[in-house]
């Protein structure tokens, strides 16, 4: 990979050398680094990224899967341009925040009230606090492989081995109240929680960073039943699945309604956002007109509900509302998973293609991938080499991460993915 990549990314290399001096690891988010160095993006449009050396990449990473309409979709750009003239940030109440909340409530089964944040991490942080405030319980539960952002109480059990802390600086106090559960194993979840009192169970309907692994419907139904029985709040982290699997997210797709939901990514229409929503009586614990300190659960933020993100998000959600684009993407996603499977199988390479709807990932392993423990046994080196090879040939997946589709992807983009995958599969076979 390195020789041909380095010869066509010389300006990126120079930028990387500069970046290393001023940004730890040369990046603003450690997962964005890959070997030998990341290319530097100069611009993006539709389904493509263009780097500073003039190389073009079909983008299946889509800004951490946020860009379901592709880069700079005209409708969103036009709406934002108009809003820029009317103020970038108010710090006061405005109608757009009501409109976006109303739109979420219209399409998301669990949403009765909404609050906006600037990221998915923040939304998970506030919803966890709210769950504790509402239930009066301290402990919470999450799943192995579940990624909910860098908030201390949920930044645990993300990568295998799941008992190694994900970061330095996490205090025992922050982590001792979090129970880590096995994904897609409802029997074991019931067993582990038999003698526990927990405020909430947070689950991604599809493990995104954990490998693009869909929850089984019966698993989510089992969680719903367990939570209702034990007075636990079921929280769906739909930062990836929200407005992607269906207009109403994973909960609509699976037909399982949680008590609370967390959103991010697509909701911002390409701008920073997060949100949490859910049952009225729970959300009302944030209302300082109803509850006095220390009985209310605080939420706020300087840029919360900033008008640019609200405008971009509202425009995006309106486009997605009728489900037509999403259904189309889900169909294409199904075909991609099938074709990738066929290509690797025809070349005798053991690969499991995971994902659902317009999400997909490839794991180099024979065993069916039902949970992140199985992913941990896969051949990571082959997966990285596959993605690096795609990058070298003009297709961008952030190595090892789940890819996504946008309405901007063309059949030619997808054919290129098949072609380069076939070449890689043949190479694997020849070895
Ligand atoms: C499922 C899930 N939850 C939460 C987050 C954190 O969101 P953010 O990066 O906006 O803080 C992410 C980000 O990748 C995510 O995939």
Image: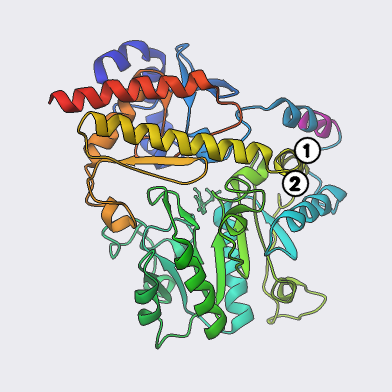
Is mark 1 in CB contact (under 8 Å) with mark 2? yes
Dot 1 falls on a residue whose secondary structure is loop
* 314 w.r.t. 159: above or below: above
Residue at 55% in and 71% down: 234
Quarter where residue 45 is shown:
top right
Percent of width and height locating residue 229: 54, 84
Residue sitting nearer the eye, 422 or 122: 422
Position of 1 relative to 225 (above/below): above
Depth check: give the residue in front, 28 or 182.
Answer: 182
Q: Does any portion of residue 23 appear in the rendered image?
A: no
> According to the image, label 2 marks what residue?
306
| Real-space CA distance between mark 1 and mark 2, rounded to the nearest whole angstrom | 7 Å
Farthest bottom residue in view: 195
Name the residue tied to disc 1. 88
Magenta part of the chain:
80-85
- Foreground residue, 243 or 100? 243
**Residue 153 pos. (x, y %):** 46, 67
Tell me the quarter of the picture where residue 187 sits. bottom left
Quadrant the C terminus occupies: top left
Give the mark nearest the N terminus, 1 or 2: 1
Q: Is residue 318 left or right of residue 294?
A: right
């Amino acid at each position: 990979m390195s020789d041909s990549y380095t010869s066509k990314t010389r300006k990126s290399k120079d930028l990387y050398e500069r970046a290393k001096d001023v940004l730890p690891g040369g990046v603003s988010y450690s997962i964005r680094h890959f070997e030998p160095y990341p290319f530097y993006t100069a611009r993006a449009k539709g389904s493509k990224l263009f780097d500073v050396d003039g190389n073009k990449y079909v983008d299946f990473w889509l800004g951490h899967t946020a860009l379901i309409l592709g880069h700079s979709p005209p409708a969103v750009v036009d709406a934002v341009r108009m809003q820029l003239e009317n103020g970038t940030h108010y710090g006061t109440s405005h109608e757009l925040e009501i409109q976006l909340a109303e739109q979420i409530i219209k399409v998301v089964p669990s949403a009765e009230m909404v609050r906006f944040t600037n990221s998915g991490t923040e939304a998970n942080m506030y919803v966890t606090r709210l769950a504790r405030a509402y239930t009066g319980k301290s402990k919470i539960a999450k799943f192995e492989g579940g990624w909910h952002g860098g908030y201390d109480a949920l930044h645990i059990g993300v990568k295998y081995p799941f008992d190694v802390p994900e970061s330095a600086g996490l205090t025992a106090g922050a982590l001792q109240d979090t129970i880590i559960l096995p994904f897609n194993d409802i029997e074991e979840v019931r067993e582990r929680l038999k003698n526990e009192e927990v405020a909430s169970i947070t689950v991604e309907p599809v493990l995104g960073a954990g490998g693009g692994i869909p929850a089984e419907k019966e698993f989510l139904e089992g969680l719903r039943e367990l939570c209702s029985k034990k007075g636990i709040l079921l929280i769906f982290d739909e930062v990836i699945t929200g407005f992607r699997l269906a207009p109403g997210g994973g909960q609509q797709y699976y037909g399982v309604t949680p008590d609370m939901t967390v959103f991010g990514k697509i909701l911002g229409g390409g701008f920073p956002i997060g949100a949490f929503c859910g049952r009225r009586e729970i959300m009302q614990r944030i209302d300082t007109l109803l509850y006095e300190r220390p009985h209310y659960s605080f939420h706020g933020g300087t840029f919360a509900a900033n008008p640019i993100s609200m405008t971009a998000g509202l425009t995006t959600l309106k486009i997605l509302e009728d489900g037509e684009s999403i259904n189309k993407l889900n169909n294409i996603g199904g075909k991609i998973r099938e074709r990738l499977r066929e290509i690797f199988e025809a070349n005798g390479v053991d690969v499991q293609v995971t994902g659902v709807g317009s999400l997909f990932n490839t794991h180099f392993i024979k065993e069916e991938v039902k949970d992140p423990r199985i992913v941990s046994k896969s051949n990571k080196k082959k997966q990285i080499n596959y993605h690096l090879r795609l990058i070298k040939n003009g297709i961008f997946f952030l190595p090892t991460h789940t890819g996504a589709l946008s309405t901007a992807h063309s059949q030619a983009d997808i054919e290129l993915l098949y072609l380069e995958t076939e070449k890689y599969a043949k190479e694997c076979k020849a070895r």
